[in-house]
Image (cartoon, rainbow, N blue to C red):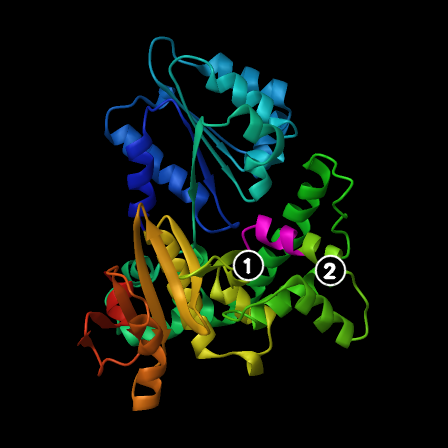
Amino acid sequence: MVEREDYLSKLLTWKDDKLIKVITGMRRSGKSSLLRQYQQKLLASGVSPDQIISLNFDDPQCEHYREYHRLYQYVLDRLVPDQMNYIFLDEVQMVPDFQKAVDSLFIRENVDLYITGSNAYLLSGELATLLSGRYVEINMLPLSFKEYCALKGPKEKERMFADYLTYGALPYLAAMDDPSEKVDVYLEGIYNTIIVKDIELRQQRKEPDPNRRKVSDLSLLGHIARILAVSIGSPISVQSIADSIASAGRMISPNTVSDYLDALTESYLFYPVERYDVRRKGTKRKLYIADLGLRRYLIPQQHWDLGASVENTVYLELLRRYSAVHVGNIGRMKVDFVARKGNCLCYFQVAESLLGQDAFEREITPLRAIRDNYPKTILTMDPYTAGNYGGIEVVPMLDWLLQ
């Protein structure tokens, strides 16, 4: 089990602060393992096992406590007086009205509270109101390429990157020596769990909203998921999805498409990325998938393309390193990503290759048109064009991913 150093570092930074640590992310991305690793860090630092209270609500043994009064009483009975108590509630959205137990625990003295969830509604509605300003969110992604290489050991990085793009980066699959025979079965199970279990929970638990339609047609949901998987890296709109479905013989309103899109993004299967216009803010957006193995599962092999997969990989890595990531443009020219940390911007172009003058000019021209002094980088799969071109860095992508 690879140690998730970046996420552990974030948790340790917030340790003992009077804030709820909320860890979100797609199912099987490693949230439960992260909690176990963090608990080991606590024990190694001298925390007593009695000070750690942990419940995983995906575990049938915890089914009895999927009622918030019982959950609250269970934890209350185990609090150690006059010492800090570390409470871990994994997949807490499985508990109806869990926010009431969470809020009641949060206000007690000597309680350091950690919760995880696989759906964005964890931080919506009543919980968001109760805990406004009292939590910090850590969004967890599947393994980075650097973590993937650490798990696989010393192997040729190009071969590992090919596997990374093909099979994805979910920790369980990455740990297999040869996942090729098992990958589709495992990914199918995860996909069905996300589509059926999490989205059904969304319908049951979300506060009633007369303007939101029930996401009950799983066939339609799957159809929209496949459209998004094919369209990775391309601007997409609710209307374009509705038009695509209509061309297949089914009429659907843009409002319905919007509700189904919300379901797919709230489950962290897809991440929407807003357009950042260097000169003025725009409204178009792209969507990227949380794991490329799931993309390969969703779409036929003939639709597979390296460019979209590489761009998706870079987006997820930027999401790990920066506080906000946008897709950008300047006039009619596009900038693949604009990443922000604090008041600093960084611009990124992603290219399979810069070999050939046309390809080189196509990628570097938009960056040259940006008249500020923030860093500008082109990430490329070819190792031959690396260097500094008038302040614009060209960096081999695999080296950058392993930094």
Query: Which residue is the site of mark 1?
Result: 283
User: Can residue 128 be spotted in the picture?
Assistant: yes
Q: Residue at x 56, y 43 (%)?
A: 120
- Residue 12 rendering spot, x and y as whole percentages: 29, 34
- Residue 368 rendering spot, x and y as whole percentages: 29, 73
- Residue 114 rendering spot, x and y as whole percentages: 43, 30
Please indicate whether residue 349 sits to the left or right of residue 242 in the image: left
Tell me which corner region of the image, top left, top right, bottom left or bottom right, holds residue 32. top left
Above or below residue 291? Residue 310 is: below
Q: Is residue 263 magenta?
A: yes
Please indicate whether residue 228 sits to the left or right of residue 242 in the image: left
Q: Residue at x 49, y 70 (%)?
A: 233
Task: Name the element at disc 2.
Answer: helix
Task: Name the element at disc 1.
Answer: loop
Q: Residue at x 65, y 51 (%)?
A: 263
Mark 2 closeness class: few <14, some 14–19, many ≥20 residues within 10 Å: some
The secondary structure that dominates the magenta segment is: helix
Which badge, 1 or 2, is on the more N-terminal residue?
Answer: 2
Query: Which residue is the site of mark 2?
Result: 254
31, 397: nearer the viewer: 397
Residues drawn in magenta: 261-269
